[in-house]
Amino acid sequence: MAKLIEPSTRPQVAALVLVCAACLAIDTGCRYAGARGPDSTNVCTWTMDEFMISHWGSPKDEKSLKLFLGDHINTVIAVPEEVEFCRKHALKVLLAAPGEEAAHYLGDPIVWGYFIIDEPARKKIEYSTLVPRFRRHHDLDPTKPAYINLNREDDVEKFVEMFEPRVLSYDYYQWWEGQEEFFALLERFRRAALAADIPLICWVEAVVVPSGPIPADNQAKIRQSVYCSLAYGVKGIQWWAWRNFNRDAGAVNAELKRLGPVLVKLRSVNVFHTAPVPEGTRAIPNGHWVQSPTKQLVVGLLQDRHKNDFILLANRDHSQSQDAVLRFTRPLAAAKKMDKRTGQWVTLDISKEKDAQETTLHLPAGDGELLKIEWPF
């Protein structure tokens, strides 16, 4: 638990904290093979070991808290005064505090990272003015990420180059702003995250209308946003415009809670689309080991650290369900699907079709499934 520090002693304490952080970096070694901390060649960086399910802000009372926990939210944005309330209920915090206050929480497991700012380009804030503040947090705590959320107006390549972040976060609300840029932005931010070897997380809207009655297809649409993003390898979903009387996001989060422990350990290898292929994305190449004649699919290929193959299959069509056919041109030993209700792997039926093996999965509107592919030894 953080202790209050007299203002007159804070400079000395801050200096001591920096020394301790440096010692921690030397003693523990790096846990994450991602970007280095700014201006440092021997800094222990951070690993994302839990799938993030987040929301803007934190619960302000017991009623709100019950709804947050009931919807399986595990991380919130909080100021120092809210930390103990979050700690009591096992919520991680993205701490919104300047470096001096953040120093009180060094080594505190409740802290997920340090919130700096949201959407700097939209607010016309120059990156150069934020870099010193960002670096102070990374220098202070080499084991946690400083966090800036971007949006479509931000130059993600410039951001990564200037800040050397430990995590990449962005928002795009396709049901409010238009679907045209949804996949283009997923492509761009995925490339940037992979190039920097850092986790990607994203914001999606929990309600597909900014005001008024919630439409009947709300859950199908937000599922499409989430599962298509998962196919691109994101390791966290952050909800915007969550309404405390609507449980659609909570139903999706219940599945993310089971899928997350696997997804957070996987690295995106490729993402393909079936016809009609959205602009700026790629069709499955001829000769690739997985093929599909089914339309409107996103086929996300992922691997764990042992190079085991996984597929995150998403139904791009939020208006109707469909039976998705996958064909494997290489002989496989088994294909398993994670049961999103139990977290258990279920072996799929595989049939032989000419020179390929084939399986069929039923995908509700906008929904997705995680598959594990097992090859013969």
Image: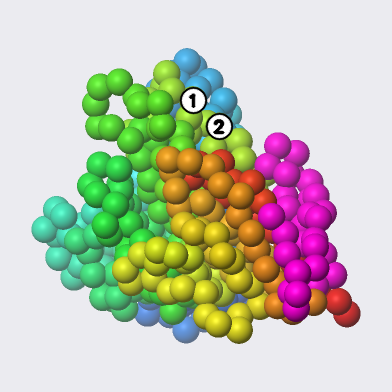
Residue 63 rendering spot, x and y as whole percentages: 47, 15
Out of 330 and 240, give the one closest to the viewer: 330
Judge the density around disc 2: few (<14), some (14-19), many (≥20) Cα neighbours within 10 Å: some
Tell which residue pokes out farthest to the left in this image: 124
Residue drawn where x is 49% and y is 70% of the image: 272
Which image quarter is the C terminus in?
bottom right
Q: Nearer the viewer, residue 341 or 138?
A: 341
User: Residue at 80% of width from left, 77% of height from top?
Assistant: 331
Amino acid found under the numbered disc labelled 2: Ala
The segment highlighted magenta reads 332-360
- In this rendering, does residue 16 appear at all? no
Residue designated by label 2: 251
Q: Amino acid at mark 1?
A: Arg
Who's the residue at 48% across and 41% down the image?
A: 320
Display coloring: rainbow
- Quadrant housing the N terminus: top right
Horizontal side of residue 192 vs 128, given as left or right = right
Residue that label 1 marks: 247
The answer to whether residue 155 is magenta is no
Question: Are there few (<14), some (14-19), or many (20+) residues within 10 Å of tag 1?
Answer: some
Q: Secondary structure at mark 2?
A: helix
Tell me the residue at 23%/47% (across/down): 177
User: Marks 1 and 2, Cα distance to the nearest angstrom?
Assistant: 6 Å
On the image, the x and y values in percent for residue 235 come to: 53, 57
> Residue 120 location in percent, x, y?
20, 57
Q: Secondary structure under badge 1?
A: loop
